[in-house]
Structures are given as structure tokens and as C-alpha cells.
Amino acid sequence: MKMMMLYVFITLMISLIMIIMLNLIAKKTFYDREKMSPFECGFDPKNLARMPFSLQFFLIAIIFVIFDVELTLFIPLILILKSSSMIHMSITIMIFLMLLIFGIFHEQSQGSLNWIK
């Protein structure tokens, strides 16, 4: 137990030292006045040069990630349940699939899956 705690402590200290060194090396401290001023024409831009991001696309991406993680959890479940009885395996899989279906119906009822509003 003491050795394991020592290994964890050493690993954390090495990680902390690496993070501090990275911040010291990568820190941008030199700000040139000409680089911070407007380019040639002399006008200050009023908005950022970023394109607007679709909130609907973001919601679909989050829903995809959530259901993808749930399906990733489903793969080891199949291997674990392989050694159990058929009834136990069927009930567990049905509950899991019902949760997935309930989640999709909930997202549909909230309007997250509708592209046109």
C-alpha cells in the first residue's frame, strides 16, 4: 500500500512539474505594439472573425456523443452477461434498450431533433 501511494505521489509530482514547465515555456509574454494595432487601413474590427456556430448542430453532436457512450457501455455488458442465464441476459438487455428508446423519445419531445422550427 505504501509503495502504491509512493508511485501515485511521484506520478502526480512529475505531471505537475511537466504542466508548470509547459506553461513557462509556452507562455506568450512578448506583445508588440504594432502587432496589437489595426492592420494598414486603420479601422478597428467591431466583431470577431469567427463564423456563427449552429446551436442545432451542437445539440445533435451532444446527443450523438451521449448515445455513442451508452452503446460503448453495451459491448462489455454483452460479454459479462454471456456467462449468466438467458432470462437474466434478456431482462438486462431489454432494460438497457428501453432506456435508449426513452432517451430518443425524450429528445424528440423536447424538439432537439427537429431541424426546422
Image (tube, rainbow, N blue to C red):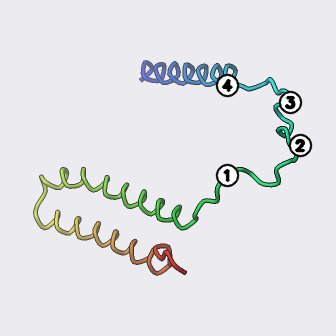
- The vertical placement of 38 against 117, above or below, is above
* Of pointers 3 and 1, the one earlier in the residue sequence: 3
How far apart are the alpha carbons under marks 3 and 1? 22 Å
Q: Amino acid at mark 4?
A: Asn
How far apart are the alpha carbons under marks 2 and 3? 12 Å
Query: Which structural element holds mark 3?
Result: helix
Label 1 environment density (alpha carbons within 10 Å; few <14, some 14–19, many ≥20): few
Residue 31 located left or right of residue 111 = right
Q: Name which quarter of the figure residue 56 lies in.
A: bottom right
Q: Residue at x 50, y 78 (%)?
A: 111
**Farthest residue in the front direction?**
41
* Of pointers 2 and 4, the one earlier in the residue sequence: 4
Q: Which residue is mark 1?
A: 50
Residue 65 located left or right of residue 29 = left
* Of pointers 1 and 4, the one earlier in the residue sequence: 4
**Discs 2/3, front:** 2
Q: Amino acid at mark 2?
A: Gly
Label 4 environment density (alpha carbons within 10 Å; few <14, some 14–19, many ≥20): few
**Discs 1/4, front:** 1
How far apart are the alpha carbons under marks 3 and 4? 25 Å
Q: Quick one: 97 or 33, which is closer to the camera?
A: 33
Q: Which residue is mark 3?
A: 34
Quadrant that contains the C terminus: bottom right
